[in-house]
Image: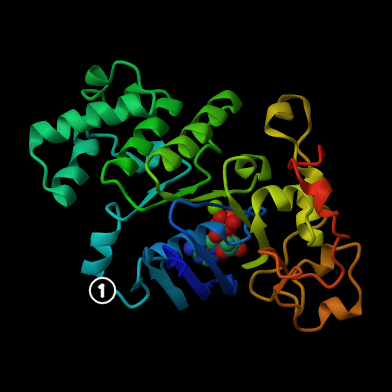
Amino acid sequence: MAMDPLLSVEELKTYLTSSRGVVKAVDGVSFTLDRGQALGVVGESGSGKSVLARAIMGLPLPNAARSGHVRFDGRELTTASRAQLREVWGKRIAMVFQDPARSLNPVVRVERQLTEGMRAHLGVSRSEARDRAVRLLAEVGVPDPERRLTNYPHQLSGGMRQRVMIAVALSCEPDLLIADEPTTALDVTVQRQILDLLRRVQHDHGMSMILISHDLAVVAGRTDRVAVMYAGRILETGATAGIFAAPRHRYTDALLGVAPSLTHRRHSRFRLIDGELPDPCAPPPGCRFAPRCPSADAACVTPGPQLRRDGGLDHMFACLHPVEPVPADLVEGGHNGR
Ligand code: ADP
Ligand code: MG
């Protein structure tokens, strides 16, 4: 019998009440994540990725109403008490955010930020926690870790701060790491180092990971599966290599069409898909991408289409006029070089 997934998200919704009305930030998201697996969540800015991350964690959001299910390691998180959630945060699920300057405490030395969680959650002694902190810093590529322990965050470069953040996230050996745009604030060379580091520690520690980015190139080659999110919904999901080689949803295809590869970003202008995301308070009926989709017709703006499976493969998309499938023997080898 197959093992239960580590994380199972079912019909998750988060609606936020704002001055503009009720923002349907996450509007019926379902997926599962296996142990040791990395999932990329991609989509344009504003598509609901960060709200989804918070909704999974059960982190408080002002004026938010959440429904649906989040089952983590056999436990329902949506009905868990604050005390139960505090046991999960940091220890079982850790997060890395875009801006390490804001997630690290500016007035606390690196040593305490690294050892606090270990001492609280793992009950290790002060000296053992310090030894572990040194090993963790070395693992995430911080040179001279003993000395770095005495630093305050402002004494570190952006890339080093993000490495420290990753070390903090790893410190209690979590089962799941959620990284939300972890490198967007960093320059291109450092971005790649940090992303490769995330993939390596995810693999070495046997963790699961959700890697969130507006940039497809970030998740390519660093995740096993990908979920393409748009206007609060997942429009396509499946194996990362398969989706990059042969996207089926018109939105995924459009995203791939404008994505510069990470290696060539320096030389290519950042382009966007024509048009804008729909009003999150009044998303269109039917396919939410239809208003921007060159292939859309009347059927696309009637309620539906739901995610459906692609010929029994582990690949789902919600598109009435999908891109023609690429024969399986051509999919081998991944990205088609766009
Ligand atoms: P992403 O991370 O994909 O860029 P977000 O999850 O941050 O997108 O936002 C999804 C939608 O929810 C957007 O329309 C955004 O404007 C809206 N939103 C995010 N946070 C709030 C909030 N605190 N109050 C009202 N609307 C919000
Ligand atoms: Mg975000």
Q: Is residue 97 left or right of residue 248?
A: left
**Is residue 109 something one can see in this rendering?**
no
- Residue drawn at (52%, 37%) of the image: 183
- Residue drawn at (14%, 44%) of the image: 119
Q: Is residue 56 above or below residue 252?
A: below
* Residue 300, picture quadrant: bottom right
- Residue drawn at (85%, 54%) of the image: 326
Secondary structure of the residue carrying numbered label 1: loop
Q: Nearer the viewer, residue 202 or 211?
A: 202
**Is residue 265 something one can see in this rendering?**
yes
- Amino acid type at image mark 1: Ser
Tell me where residue 33 appears, x and y as whole percent. Answer: 49, 61
Q: Is residue 248 above or below residue 335?
A: below
Q: Nearer the viewer, residue 41 or 8?
A: 8
Q: Nearer the viewer, residue 65 or 137?
A: 137
* Category of crowding for the residue at label 1, using alpha-carbon neighbours closer than 10 angstroms: few (below 14), some (14–19), many (at least 20): few
Question: Which residue corresponds to mark 1?
Answer: 81
Q: Residue furthest bottom?
A: 303
Quadrant location, the N terminus: bottom left
Indicate how the structure is coloured in the image.
rainbow
Tell me where residue 75 appears, x and y as whole percent. Answer: 33, 72
Q: Quadrant of ligand 1?
A: bottom right
